[in-house]
């Protein structure tokens, strides 16, 4: 635990500690990573997904959402290895002659973007509220934790749907793609902050009675500085675990919202939107339009979950 | 005990008031209801008259009071898209959702307990490993993907089960049930499994962990020493002691099952409250959204309250810690 926490600041400041790379390699965390084959595979798959999402425009044969590049001649081609397959459409095409693989690459980008931004936002809200509640205590603590309790008893997907609906009714039903993306990030951020807040608050309650906090208070540091620079770094481990598991949850939530028709529009689809579109062609026998986005989504979530499970066990001193 | 119950009840009422304020604000601040009701050519004076007749000029607290009063009488206004009272729409759809949720919970409990017991007793068998893998998939795969996969397998490829709807239903008073017809039962299978899979995973993991823990305790060792049969020890002693937390979790999860039915109902076009809610979100039909929110919250709050109170009755240890803490 302590080893893991110490290794993080050193990674950020390589100049201050010359052997930081060596130290990262020698850490307990890396040792347990090396020992778990399935974790290494999961990490590899996750990294691969991020890379192909970043380089989507280089890797795909067409920009699937530029109508000028689509040709109806190429519609409904089955995957390359089947009898009717055609190059260069490795995973086939849909009704509009859109390459399924290219659509997945671009959709992955949207899914990961919403997921990561959603996790960052929910983390920021949760950490801030958790720090405030734990550090100040009293009525502030009571209020924040009451809200957290109430929200925790409702499933996140319901809250996200509701925020989505409210946003639509406030801004009008026809939002453009980028503002829809922002609404989704906002909905996910507001749905998942509770776990961070509870964990951070718990850690702060332990940390705030330690001598180093008393020392910081004694030299007259303001409360925000103590909270962010002194208390927060000691809660990194649990936050990291929650963030990893929540990344998978955020991606599932975004995909579900998009599948339900309340997420990304068809002009800028995420994986969930692609599955929604493909679902309509299932009965026509065109299984590849829905199958490959579905497999991509499942593989992505599974590998992030495996990574999160490993991280939770590796950072838990009780399991050593 | 009484103080504890009262405090929990007050808390529950507080939550309902908060939910009421949220759903009321949706009406009040998300768009002008008059604009939703009238056409483009309505004059300003006519709009003002409608506003006055709807009481939209009254102070916030008066309007809120009226809203809560109406909600308590199950009056949630008229749906923007269907032009029908929301309460009628919800009542018509509620049996479908409740039937689905109950079947899903029963499926989850039976298969979850069986799988959990098996993987606790035969920890290293290949079937137990398969169960573990299934539980990981059950958590990782989004509900709608599982539903689509099942439709592809059992409706498109094999043609065994219907892919959408409830089949034939029988009317019993205002309640409609699909449990009494063959097509209704067939239609119920895939949605129930899809909806129950996540709870099944949860229950299986819980039963397995609890069983492993109980099997290590002294009274099990003592039962073995007394020479009881393995079967009696496993099912009479161990399993019975794991069932209390399982039933608690299943009870607490029932609210989430109803909420998660939103997804399953969309995949299978199941004519329940969840599908109504999803369509309402898409069409910004605020009366339905607000009413659904209130109904689901009421179910959640009631379940939580009942479980909390039952807990203190069933488990005397909890009662003493509660009174000691305060």
Image (spheres, rainbow, N blue to C red):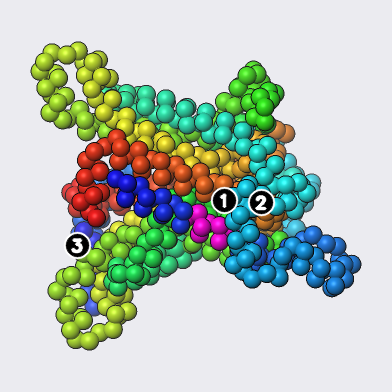
Q: Which mark is residue B76?
A: 2
Q: Where residue A236 sits in the image (x, y, percent)? A: 29, 64
Please tell me whether mark 3 sits on a helix, a strand or a loop.
helix
Residue A193 lies left or right of residue B168; in this view the side is left
In terms of depth relative to the viewer, which is nearer, B83 or A114? B83
> Label 1 crowding class (10 Å Cα cut-off): few <14, some 14-19, many 20+?
many
Q: Where residue B186 sits in the image (x, y, percent)? A: 62, 22
- The magenta segment: B15-24
Q: Chain of mark 1?
A: B
Please tell me whether mark 2 sits on a helix, a strand or a loop.
loop
**Pointers 2 and 1 in contact (C-beta within 8 Å):** yes
Tag 1 residue: B294
Q: Chain of mark 2?
A: B
Is residue A217 depicted above or below B147 in this figure?
below
Tag 3 residue: A2
Distance (Cα) linking label 2 and label 1: 10 Å
* Residue at 61% over, 51% down: B71
Q: Residue furthest right?
A: B41
* Residue at 25% over, 84% down: A221
Q: Where residue B114 sits in the image (x, y, percent)? A: 37, 24
Q: Is residue A134 visible?
A: yes
Q: Which picture quadrant has residue A177?
A: bottom right
Q: Is residue A243 visible?
A: no
């Amino acid at each position: 635990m302590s080893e893991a926490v110490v290794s993080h600041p050193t990674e950020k400041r390589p100049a201050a500690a010359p052997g930081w790379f060596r130290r990262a390699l020698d850490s307990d965390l890396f040792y347990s990573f090396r020992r778990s084959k399935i974790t290494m595979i999961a990490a590899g798959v996750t990294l691969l997904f991020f890379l192909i999402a970043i380089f989507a425009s280089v890797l795909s044969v067409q920009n699937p959402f530029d109508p000028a590049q689509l040709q109806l001649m190429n519609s409904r081609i089955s995957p390359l290895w089947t009898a009717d397959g055609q190059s260069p459409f490795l995973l086939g095409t849909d009704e509009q002659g859109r390459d399924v693989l290219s659509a997945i690459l671009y959709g992955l980008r949207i899914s990961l973007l919403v997921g990561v931004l959603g996790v960052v936002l929910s983390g920021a809200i949760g950490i801030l509220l958790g720090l405030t509640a734990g550090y100040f205590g009293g009525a502030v603590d009571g209020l924040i934790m009451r809200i957290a309790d109430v929200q925790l008893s409702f499933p996140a997907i319901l809250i996200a749907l509701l925020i989505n609906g409210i946003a639509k009714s406030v801004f009008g039903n026809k939002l453009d793609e980028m503002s829809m993306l922002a609404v989704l990030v906002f909905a996910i951020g507001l749905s998942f902050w509770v776990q961070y807040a509870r964990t951070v608050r718990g850690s702060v309650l332990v940390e705030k009675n330690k001598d180093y906090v008393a020392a910081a208070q004694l030299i007259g540091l303001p409360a925000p500085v103590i909270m962010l620079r002194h208390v927060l770094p000691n809660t990194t481990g649990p936050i990291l675990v929650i963030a990893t598991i929540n990344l998978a949850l955020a991606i599932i939530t975004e995909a579900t919202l998009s599948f339900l028709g309340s997420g990304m529009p068809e002009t800028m689809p995420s994986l969930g939107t692609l599955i929604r579109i493909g679902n309509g062609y299932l009965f026509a026998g065109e299984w590849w339009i829905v199958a490959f986005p579905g497999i991509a989504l499942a593989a992505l979530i599974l590998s992030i979950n495996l990574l999160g499970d490993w991280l939770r066990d590796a950072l838990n001193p009780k399991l050593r | 005990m009484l103080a504890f119950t009262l405090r929990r009840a007050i808390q529950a009422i507080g939550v309902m008031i908060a939910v009421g304020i949220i759903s009321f604000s949706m009406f009040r601040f998300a768009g002008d209801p008059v604009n939703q009701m009238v056409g483009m050519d309505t004059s300003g004076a006519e709009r003002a008259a409608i506003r006055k007749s709807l009481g939209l000029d009254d102070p916030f607290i008066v309007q809120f009071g009226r809203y809560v009063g109406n909600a308590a009488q199950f009056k949630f206004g008229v749906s923007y898209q269907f032009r029908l009272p929301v309460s009628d729409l919800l009542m018509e759809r509620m049996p479908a959702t409740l039937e689905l949720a109950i079947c899903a919970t029963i499926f989850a409990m039976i298969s979850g307990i069986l799988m959990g017991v098996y993987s606790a007793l035969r920890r290293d068998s290949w079937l137990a490993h398969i169960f573990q893998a299934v539980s990981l998939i059950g958590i990782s795969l989004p509900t709608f993907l599982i539903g689509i996969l099942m439709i592809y397998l059992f409706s498109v490829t094999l043609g065994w089960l219907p892919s959408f709807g409830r089949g034939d239903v029988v009317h019993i008073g205002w309640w409609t049930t699909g449990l009494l017809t063959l097509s209704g039962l067939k239609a119920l299978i895939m949605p129930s499994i899809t909806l129950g899979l996540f709870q099944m995973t949860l229950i299986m993991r819980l039963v397995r962990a609890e069983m492993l823990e109980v099997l290590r305790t002294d009274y099990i060792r003592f039962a073995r020493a007394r020479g009881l049969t393995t079967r009696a020890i496993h099912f009479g002693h161990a399993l019975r002691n794991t069932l209390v937390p399982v039933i608690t979790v299943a009870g607490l999860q029932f609210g989430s099952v109803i909420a998660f039915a939103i997804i399953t109902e969309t995949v299978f076009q199941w004519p329940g409250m969840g599908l109504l809610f999803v369509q309402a979100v898409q069409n910004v039909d605020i009366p339905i959204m607000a009413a659904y929110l209130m109904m689901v919250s009421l179910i959640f709050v009631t379940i939580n309250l009942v479980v909390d109170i039952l807990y203190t009755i069933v488990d005397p240890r909890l009662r003493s810690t509660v009174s000691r803490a305060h």
